[in-house]
Image (cartoon, rainbow, N blue to C red):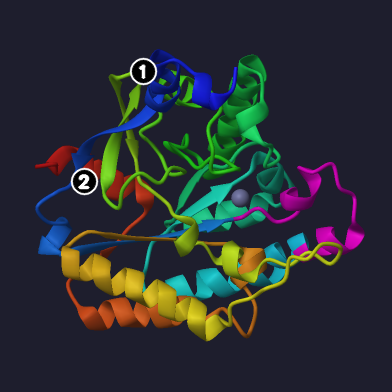
Amino acid sequence: MQPWQWPEAHWRGIVEHVRAGRTLRPASWPGGARCAIALSFDSDHETNELREGGESIGKLSQGQYGNRQGIPRILGILAQHGVKASFYVPAVTALLYPDEQRRVAAEGHELALHGWIHERNSVLPEAAERDLMLRAADVLEKLAGKRPVGIRTPSWDFSPSTLKITREMGLLYDSSLMADVDCYELLLDGEPTGVVELPVEWIRDDAVYFNMNRFAGLRPYTPPADVFDIFRRELEAAHAEGGIFQLTMHPHISGYRSRIWILEELIRHAKSLGNVWFAAHADIVRHAKAHAQ
Ligand SMILES: [Zn+2]
């Protein structure tokens, strides 16, 4: 049957399987702040190549740059400005670089789930997806000393089982979906799950503007100054509306001399706007859930 032939119950069922429920928008943020700043870094490193079954030594070296140069530059800026953030780490990255994860955790940042090997979770059978999520949580728990409470799916997508497994695991939140600018509760087949979504957007993701593939037509098409301009406008509007400014960056994509300034300028700009609260995603979600109007 073609989509235009689907009966209403069928297309409604698809749309309503995982859905945004009630908005979780607090009147203000801790300390009376008007804007929460949710900076996040997806430490994919070599897994972007491995998850495709790739063995390109050149691409793997680009992943290693994320560990050798990207992460230290990012952590340096965060420490210099006294800002806490969230790091989403595939288990394979964590196993390749346990010291990096220990340092991230020791510096007070959040470590959260980002798949096993950055697999395409949306095509996984349920049993395999559950097994990988549980094993990934074990890896991060061992390194950080506490079990992760959040997940960002590697493909920013869900399989039909992802939300069910997330709830089973007792996770506090997901940060992979895009139905709002505020936190919201996820519904599974119309029922509230208690799992909170802290929404992302490709617009606020460095990879969209900077990715390049030697053997395909993919090239960076937006200059760093223009990327900064997009992020700055997202930040200013979030501040004006009294909401959340959520941003996703990748150590192996933004951790370069010509790009890393974007992060520092955004932090400076947020501070100059005033009355902002920089926090890990988990803390923002906890506050939003407890103080939703
Ligand atoms: Zn990723």
Task: Answer with the quarter of the image where residue 192 lies.
Answer: top left
Is residue 283 at all visible to an observer of this figure?
A: yes
Residue 217: percent from the left, percent from the top? 78, 66
The secondary structure type at the circle numbered 1 is loop
Seen in the image, is 105 located left or right of residue 142?
A: left
Q: Which of marks 2 and 1 is in front?
A: 1
Q: Name the residue under label 1.
A: 189
The residue at 78%/64% (across/down) is 213
Where residue 287 is drawn, which disc sits there? Answer: 2
Which residue is more in the foreground, 18 or 59?
18
Q: Look at the image and give the residue range highlighted in magenta.
A: 43-62
Mark 1 surroundings: few (<14), some (14-19) or many (≥20) residues within 10 A? some
CA–CA distance in space, label 2 to label 1: 26 Å
Image quarter in which the C terminus is found: top left
Callout 2 secondary element: helix
Amino acid type indicated by mark 2: His
Is residue 248 on the magenta stretch?
Answer: no
Q: Residue at x 82, y 58 (%)?
A: 60
The amino acid on which the numbered mark 1 sits, given as a three-letter code, is Asp
